[in-house]
Image (cartoon, helix red, strand yellow):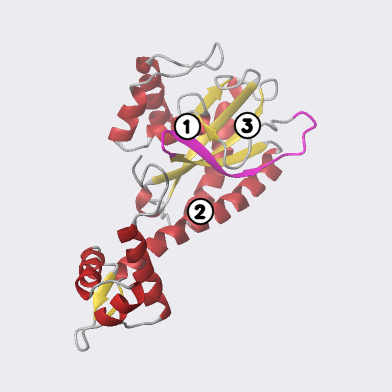
Amino acid sequence: MSPVEDGAPIQSVERAVRILELLSEQELMGVSDLARILDVHRSTAFRLLATLEGRSLVEQDGHRGAYRLGLGVLRLAGSVRRRTDLVRDAQLCCDELAERLDETTNVAIIDDGAAVNIAQAMGTQLVAVTQQYVGQRTPLHATSTGKVLLAHAPRDVREEVLEGPHERFTPSTLTEPDDVRAELEHVREQGWGAANEEWESGTCAVAVPVRGEGGLVVAAISVTAPAFRMAASTFPAYAAALREGAADLGRRLGYLAPR
């Protein structure tokens, strides 16, 4: 079994990460100092720095020849900040919508072939949808958030999922690739998606896209309720209410809707 397979750390990766940690503690460090702390030959430290510099994770001070953290670190940190902001703002929108609609609301993102709930709020109904939770992975072809996310996903991601197979969860689940493809086209055209007892019998849901900076769909926000309270005829009204929440969340994330 290789070191990667058994979970053992990769020495070069550990050393590169240690360089980043050291430069976060001390603004400028020379190759010799880094080599001494890492207990490696100076040429090894230089190769590690050159690799990091190629990714803009470190940069060299032109006057003293020492190294410091590069702008690439800010890019990575910004990605983490945006994800943190999304979760925080998503929870606020879920809370507001759950209070308004008095049903379970969720915000989900697409991740490795599934829709993942990152925020949730519950209504006060005695009979409510309680089997959903933050962190839960749900199928893209059988849930309202999954359909919305997949409909707006990059083409290569969408096509990979459409190849199937698609698991059947209830008699209403769409499992044929052509049927799922047609459903996604319908979702894009009407601007929202629904799951009519397709993932869980007796449960319906409606979702709309959430757009971030640049207008890209970064999440989907949904409302879920027992089927006896959410007939198909009510889907458009729920979608309209969700659009308001999605617009608010989008504004928080930096999306400027066209006038």
Is the Cβ of the residue at disc 1 closer than 8 Å to that at disc 2? no
Foreground tag (3 vs 1): 1
Mark 1, residue position? 146
**Residue 30 appearing in the image:** no
Structural crowding at the residue carrying mark 3, measured as other residues with C-alpha within 10 Å and reported as few (<14), some (14–19) or many (≥20): many
- Above or below — where is 255 with respect to 184? below
Outermost residue toward the bottom in this view: 63
Outermost residue toward the right in this view: 126
Mark 3, residue position? 224
The tag earlier along the polypeptide, 3 or 1, is 1
Location of residue 70 in the rendering, given as x and y in whole percent from the top left corner: 30, 72
Count every numbered label the image shows and give the total. Answer: 3
In the figure, is residue 204 to the left or right of 13?
Answer: right
The question of residue 236 being in magenta is answered with no
What residue type is disc 1 on?
Answer: Gly
SS class, disc 2: helix
The question of residue 114 being in magenta is answered with yes
In the figure, is residue 252 to the left or right of 124?
Answer: left
Mark 2, residue position? 86
Which of the 4 image quadrants contains residue 205? top right
The tag earlier along the polypeptide, 3 or 2, is 2
**Looking at this view, is 53 or 3 the one in front?**
3
Quadrant for the N terminus, please.
top left
- Above or below — where is 58 with respect to 65? above
Which stretch appears magenta? 111-127
**Looking at this view, is 201 or 102 the one in front?**
201
Structural crowding at the residue carrying mark 2, measured as other residues with C-alpha within 10 Å and reported as few (<14), some (14–19) or many (≥20): many
In the figure, is residue 213 to the left or right of 244?
Answer: left
